[in-house]
Amino acid sequence: MTLPATGTAPAVVRLVGARKTYGSGENAVTALAGVDLAFPAGSFTAVMGPSGSGKSTLLQCAAGLDRVDGGRVELAGADPATLTETELTVLRRSRVGFVFQHFNLLPSLTARQNVELPLRLDGLRPDAARVDRALDEVGLRDRAGHLPGELSGGQQQRVAIARALVARPDVLFADEPTGALDTTASRGVLALLRRAVDGHGRTVVMVTHDPVAAAGADRVVFLADGAVVGELDRPTAAGVAARMAGLEAVAC
Ligand code: ADP
Ligand code: MG
């Protein structure tokens, strides 16, 4: 079965009937209840839904950080379920960038060393020009020698984004990347993600609770109880907020 991608660009990531259950028996929790989604190359998708609706699980499975137990995932042309752990690690390192709410930078490494890390883990000698470009893309070349503790939250998240982009992944996943930031820093990070798509042809999938943030995406996908319950193309903040209010009311 082939699902059409939105628009004309081929899908970088696809979930087909993706299911994921945690635990078993009485304690079983269905986090993904059969999700069909495609993320076209060069697009910016926001994922929204009430707490516990499966957003993080969706990202982890789409990124090959976790495995689905029904249906399948196609990531950069591969099916993670058919790969060994080693092959999956290679796929993740070369094709996927992941950004977390709490940055997850190594505190004893400078911004530059944090950005170099994925290249070193791949056994490459970090190419200085490449690291410079990644730092330039997030506007932080002049902070390259600083430790994370010497940077603001917004700057730390931009370093984390540079680290996620330095290996030129096919897709960048971000799980509530602005969740720990104030409004100004959030807007900076969102503008950066938008520019990564528009200016550098990146593909971004971002979980957010913020309708204004979601309105910066090309498309919003709404989840509830592990299922896709709606989509908005060319979203507005008001349209997103109204849709979310409906979902939160049902979830309560
Ligand atoms: P969201 O990111 O939308 O808040 P999650 O994907 O984190 O949702 O979680 C979806 C459901 O799966 C929730 O009911 C959550 O409690 C459950 N869940 C998530 N991770 C685990 C886990 N490691 N073990 C057991 N249950 C989990
Ligand atoms: Mg989550």
Image (cartoon, grey):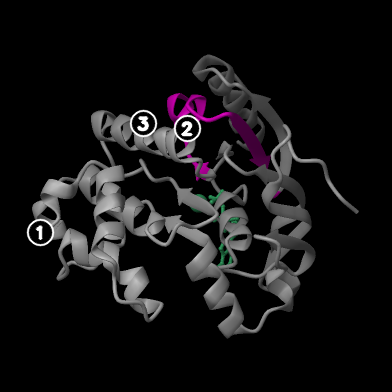
Residue at 48% over, 69% down: 93
Between discs 1 and 3, the one toward the N terminus: 1
Label 2 residue SS: helix
In this rendering, position of residue 59 left or right of residue 224: left
The residue wearing badge 2 is 198
Quadrant in the rendering for residue 177? top left
Q: Decide: marks 3, 2 in contact (CB < 8 A)?
A: no
Label 1 residue SS: loop
Between discs 1 and 2, the one toward the N terminus: 1
Amino acid type of the residue that numbered disc 3 sits on in the rendered structure: Ala
- Residue 90 lies, in percent from the top left, at 53, 76
CA gap, disc 1 and disc 2:
28 Å
The residue wearing badge 3 is 191
The number of numbered badges drawn on the structure is: 3
Label 3 residue SS: helix
Quadrant in the rendering for residue 91? bottom right
Region rendered in magenta: 205-226
In this rendering, position of residue 79 left or right of residue 117: right
Q: Residues within 10 Å of mark 2 (few under 14, many from 20)?
A: some
Residue at 37% over, 51% down: 101
Quarter of the image that includes the C terminus: top right
Between discs 3 and 2, the one toward the N terminus: 3
Residue 178 counted in the magenta span? no
Residue at 51% over, 40% down: 201
Q: Decide if residue 192 is in sight here.
A: yes
